Amino acid sequence: MNRYIKLLLVFMTLRFGHTAAGQELDSLYVKEPMDYLTFLGIVGKENIAYTAERFNINIAQAEIETAKIFPDPELEFGWFDNGERRMRMGYGFTSELTWILELGGKRKARIDLARNQTQLTQYQLEDYFRNLRADATLSYLLAVQNRMLLEVQRNSYQQLNQLAVSDSIRYNLGAISQVDARQSKLEAGSMLNEIYNAEAAYKTSLVGLSLLLGDKKKDTLIYPTANFSSFDRTFSLQDLLVTAINSRADLKAALQDKQVSASAIKLAKANRAIDLGLKLGVNYASDARNIIAPTPSFTTVMASIAVPLKFSNNRHGELRATRYANMQSEYIYRQIELEIKTELTQAYYAYQSVEKQIRQFDKGLLTEAKAILDGKVYSYQRGETSLLEVLNAQRTYNEIQQTYYQTLYNYAEALVELERASGIWDINF
């Protein structure tokens, strides 16, 4: 009887010991189950990096207001004294208002350039969110996969642990040899180490989800509630290519960059036009009270136009630079278009490949492996087969389950990458 009590204590230690280890990290965080759509919504609102990127829109809009500014006028005041106290030559005041009159459409060119840059910034922000949304989805899917792999390890451990306890009892009853009892116990202990590794991977992926949600969730451990489902799609590669060309934000940004370069050329040309300096002045001189040439006080009004001599127009560096930038933007656009087509085609074939792998599992691989394992365990308990055959069947079943969940993740990942590449998004699971 004492032996049975000791065996029961060993079983409870193995059973509850790893449960406590798995909850050690959880105690540092607030647990919060979260579905996919809620998770993605919080990412769009609270992600710190994305919030920082959104300020680029405000900065670009402020640049438009800056471009609208007219040159500031300059107001100058002066005082003079003729310095002849004996001759009483008097003193005076001067004032002058100077303003630059821009010609050649400089202000309009600046505003157009700033507006085009704002639109470019908007497309760049859309493309940033396109990648953020896909990356956040993959992180969520990875956490789901790691949770399922952990469940596989736990279920396998429980079955092996029960077998080990049963073998210990059977050994004490003389039904099996000591080697078989020790072997089953060893396999259960080895499986417990694999649980610890799976737990670490799972917890690491959960912490990664919290990072995506910003400061408000920094003390929260998000637990995905979704499963792998709703990833079956039927696509036409030609339709996807057309959609990608029309909707990819990075391609729109490349096209807008061409417009920005064209606006920069217009501004460079406008900067070559001369600007007129307009001046308006008022001078006052006090009376001169000398006996030789007495002069009454007087006020003079002066207006003038200053025409700069644009010797710098002989230098075409700024204009040439903008023209080269415009030519460069054309090649960048063509390169991005080619990259999109290549990326989309690769993603399409990758999705089709994983889809074929999923169909293999639909043909009953998991069911067959489970039936074989159950049969081996039943035969072993009846003494009709060896422990080695049971362990081999257990490993095969584990590997098939792990491969199945990894293939499900690969299938979901392939869909995410395909929709990322095509510029569409209808993922919900």
Image (cartoon, rainbow, N blue to C red):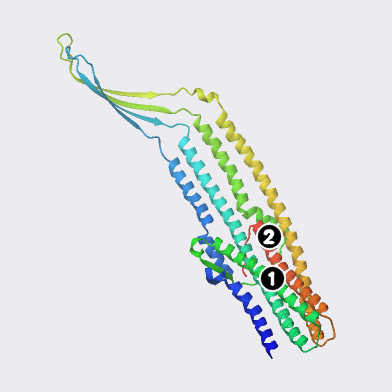
Circles 2 and 1, Cβ within 8 Å, touching? The answer is: no
Of residue 51 and residue 341, the one placed in the foreground of this image is 51
Q: Residues within 10 Å of mark 1 (few under 14, many from 20)?
A: some
Q: Nearer the viewer, mark 2 or mark 1?
A: 1
Q: Position of residue 21 (x, y in %)?
A: 60, 72
Q: Secondary structure under badge 2?
A: helix
> What x and y, as percent, mark residue 424?
63, 60
Rendering quarter of residue 344:
bottom right
What is the three-letter code of the residue carrying label 2? Leu
Q: Is residue 275 above or below residue 347?
A: above
What residue is disc 1 on? 193
Question: On the rendered image, what quadrant is the C terminus found in?
Answer: bottom right
Q: Residue at x 64, y 63 (%)?
A: 138
Q: Residue at x 52, y 64 (%)?
A: 42
- What is the x, y in percent for residue 278? 37, 27
The secondary structure type at the circle numbered 1 is: helix
Q: Residue at (44%, 24%) from the top-left corner? A: 308
Name the residue that disc number 2 marks. 418
Q: Is residue 230 above or below residue 100?
A: below
Disc 2 to disc 1, C-alpha distance: 37 Å
Q: Amino acid at mark 1?
A: Asn
Position of 263 relative to 282 (above/below): below
> What is the residue that sits farthest to the right in this orientation?
384
Please state if 396 lies on the left or on the right of 209 as rendered. Answer: right
Residue 54 appears at what percent x and percent y? Answer: 50, 53
Specify whether 114 is left or right of 401: left
Judging depth in this view, the residue of 164 and 144 nearest the camera is 164
Closer to us: 50 or 337? 50
**Residue 141 visible within the image:** no
Q: Quadrant of the N terminus?
A: bottom right
- In the displayed image of the protein, which residue is found farthest to the top? 292
